[in-house]
Image (cartoon, rainbow, N blue to C red):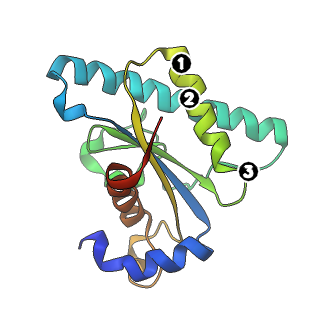
Amino acid sequence: MSYHEYDDLSIDAQKKGKYQIFVFDIKDSKKMLPKERRQIQLKSMQLLLSVYNRLEQLEMKLNRKILHKNSKFISPLNSSKNNFRGDMFEPFNITGDCFGLTIIRGSIDSEIVYNIWKEEKDKIAIDCEFRVADMYYETDDYAMGGTKYFRGYCMQKAENDSKRKGRVI
């Protein structure tokens, strides 16, 4: 089913969702030459992992949970994507040019995540911009997706929102 069919749950989740998804979509990736796009995608995965690592370090420094971790999530470094739905990865890469991660609602301000992304992007020297968006969801369990806003739908909606109205960093 399309994530659009769950807009009512999405609206409610923005008020009470426990988890906050951030997406970073490579701006104008379809206009890039294939070799250039692939290089940017590889650097973007490196960037995503650097940001994730920085957030793990921040967790230790602040002595509190920031990143949403679920024992069912799969690291993008540990497994082939062929056997799993995209929403099962954390951090995640969906549709080739969209990257993201999940934090616990209220654990840190959104701007901290965006600032870390910009700092790491500068370090890695990626020559592109990213359309970004963030939003909340309620459950990682697909079976509960009819009554609670599901992670996979949130990923799709956030990616779409980043393209339509997301800011650029």
Residue at position x 58%, y 62% in the image: 19
Q: Is residue 158 above or below residue 39?
A: below
* Residue type of the residue flagged with mark 2: Lys
Above or below for 119 versus 156: above
Q: What residue sits right under mark 3 in the picture?
A: 65
Please give the residue where the numbered disc 1 appears in the rendered image.
122
* Depicted 82 relative to depicted 70: above or below: above
Q: Residue at x 31, y 70 (%)?
A: 3
Q: Classify residue 52 by image quadrant.
A: top right
Helix, strand or loop at label 3? It is: loop
Of marks 1 and 3, the one in the foreground: 1
The location of residue 82, given as percent across then percent down, is 24, 44
Q: Secondary structure at mark 2?
A: helix
Q: In the rendered image, which residue does mark 2 sit on?
A: 118
Label 1 near label 2: C-beta < 8 Å? yes
- Label 2 and label 1: CA atoms lie apart by 6 Å
